[in-house]
Amino acid sequence: MKHLLRWPGLREVGERGLLLLDYDGTLTPIAERPELALLPPDVARTLRTLSRRLKVVIMSGRSLRDLRKLVGEKGVYYGGNHGMEIEGPGISFALPKATRFRPLLRRVSRELRERMRGVKGALVEDKGLSLSLHYRLVDPKREGEVRKILEEVTGPHRDRLRITEGKKVLEVRPNLPWDKGRASLLLLRLLDRGRKLLPVYLGDDRTDEDAFRALNRRGGVTVLVSEKPVDSSARFFLRNPKEVALFLQKLEILSGEAEKKR
């Protein structure tokens, strides 16, 4: 795995890149609570500039509504709920089969909230097409209890729902063949239109591995954001959101140079 900032191919990204960026842990440091993960002003400014020159996508497990509120750029494409819903200039998509799960997810969310009342620090986030159970603030001694409650609540719906794990968060999603990888390929298909876009995906969590694998097969630039070496399908790495910000700033310069040549 190579360090992205030392890669000589960055100029090509500035010319024809399709940027797919995770939010938490990539554009912003992981926060104790989801609402505290605010986009740094300098990163927001850089994204605004890049969205005028390149195709920029924010791909996250967060809801579409949450992403739009946090990023707030009209020229950016948003892939919410792991890409089950996508919106941006000229695109409005919701995975048809996923929308049928809304009533079930609401019921599971209500039951989880009721069962988690006695677990200090547990937070249930209903995102419409998926749920997140955050346990970062839970006493480590009670993490096993959190997992047990989740298994008991979702157990009766095991054939319809699946649980995936992130950094101190458990995700409940429709049991459908869809993930960030498939969503990224869909966006590449919709946005390319003969432009020969080069997909560049930055992510820090397990759910981003689906996108790494899918885009590696398409010759993409896949980047793991991690302080420590871990087993990953990504071809490149950046250590933290600060290095992500440096990468975006460098890309801003390179894309500006490419724009002048056109």
Image: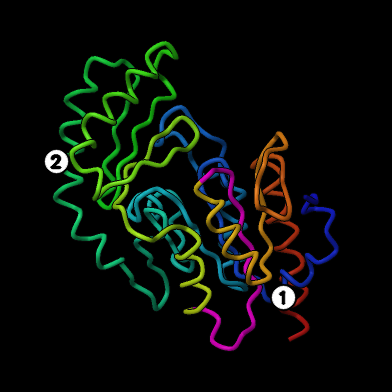
User: Which residue: 67% across, 49% down?
Assistant: 245
Q: Vertically, is 50 above or below 133?
A: below
- Where does residue 33 sit, x and y in percent of width and height? 41, 30
Which range is magenta? 191-206
Q: Determine which of the numbered discs, if any, sits on residue 107 in the image.
A: 2
User: Which residue: 19% across, 53% down?
Assistant: 102
Q: Earlier in the sequence, mark 2 or mark 1?
A: 1
Q: Vertically, is 11 above or below 101?
A: below
Side of 228 relative to 157 (left or right): right
Q: Nearer the viewer, residue 20 or 252?
A: 20
Query: The residue tagged with tag 1: helix, strand or loop?
Result: helix
Q: Determine which of the numbered discs, if any, sits on residue 48 in the image.
A: none
Residue position for label 1: 15
Query: The residue tagged with tag 2: helix, strand or loop?
Result: helix
- Where does residue 175 sit, x and y in percent of width and height? 31, 53
User: Which residue: 31% across, 66% down?
Assistant: 95
User: Which residue: 51% across, 70% down?
Assistant: 185
Q: Quadrant of the C terminus?
A: bottom right
Q: Nearer the viewer, residue 29 or 207?
A: 207
How is the rendered protein coloured?
rainbow
Determine the image quadrant of residue 113: top left
